[in-house]
Image (cartoon, helix red, strand yellow):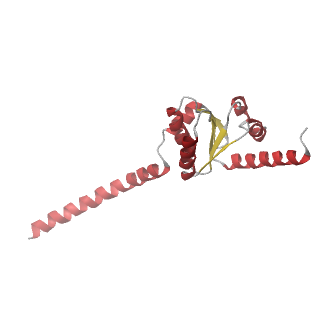
Amino acid sequence: MPNAKVLEQKQKIVADLKEKISAAVTGVVVDYKGINVADDTALRRELRENGVDYFVVKNTLLSRAIADTELEGMQSVLEGTTALALSNEDYAAPARILSKYAEKSETFKIKAGFIDGALADLETIGAIAKLPSREVLLATVVGAFQAPIAAFARAVQAIVDKNGEAAE
């Protein structure tokens, strides 16, 4: 039986983990088996640059953190090596980055994921992974809003240029 100090530390870890998961808009659980140090460092850097919190977690601690929540169904995949990627802002970043790496690796696999506190199947995670980055989506929306205004401005300028030629 663990002593009181160890038990208290584990309870704090579970509480912190539960808080991180509830604050995240999306999360992906992976089996990181077979990743070498250089690839792990590059993967962690890319995740960090995209605002994703990525860390290795013990299965029992994660299991306790998701107990009695909507994510409890994830407990069936909590075996072997487990890492968790959480994002508080970008819905697609964890899935996009980890899926890209999983495609190149034989052993690195996505186990499960969630979006807005609800479990997402692997097909949904794959679909989200194919979404472009937030910046690209915003640029596309801005471009869509600008296109009619730019076309109108060109039409007005053409009328002004045509009227200017007739006056000369």
Residue 73 relative to residue 35: left or right: right
Q: Residue at x 62, y 51 (%)?
A: 88
Q: Residue at x 54, y 41 (%)?
A: 39
State whether residue 91 appears in this view.
no
Q: How many marks do you count on the picture?
A: 0
Examine the image and state in which quarter residue 67 appears. top right
Q: Is residue 147 above or below residue 26?
A: below
| Outermost residue toward the left in this view | 168
State whether residue 42 appears in this view.
yes
Check the picture and name the quadrant holding the N terminus.
top right
| Outermost residue toward the front in this view | 37
Examine the image and state in which quarter residue 30 appears. top right
Q: Position of residue 148 (x, y in %)?
A: 33, 54
Residue 66 relative to residue 101: left or right: right
Check the picture and name the quadrant holding the C terminus.
bottom left
Residue 143 relative to residue 132: left or right: left
Q: Residue at x 74, y 46 (%)?
A: 18
Report the front residue among 83 and 113: 83
Examine the image and state in which quarter residue 152 appears. bottom left
Q: Position of residue 165 (x, y in %)?
A: 11, 66
Q: Is residue 164 above or below residue 78?
A: below
Report the front residue among 143 and 132: 132
Report the front residue among 18 and 166: 18
Q: Position of residue 53 (x, y in %)?
A: 63, 49
Q: Position of residue 50 (x, y in %)?
A: 54, 51
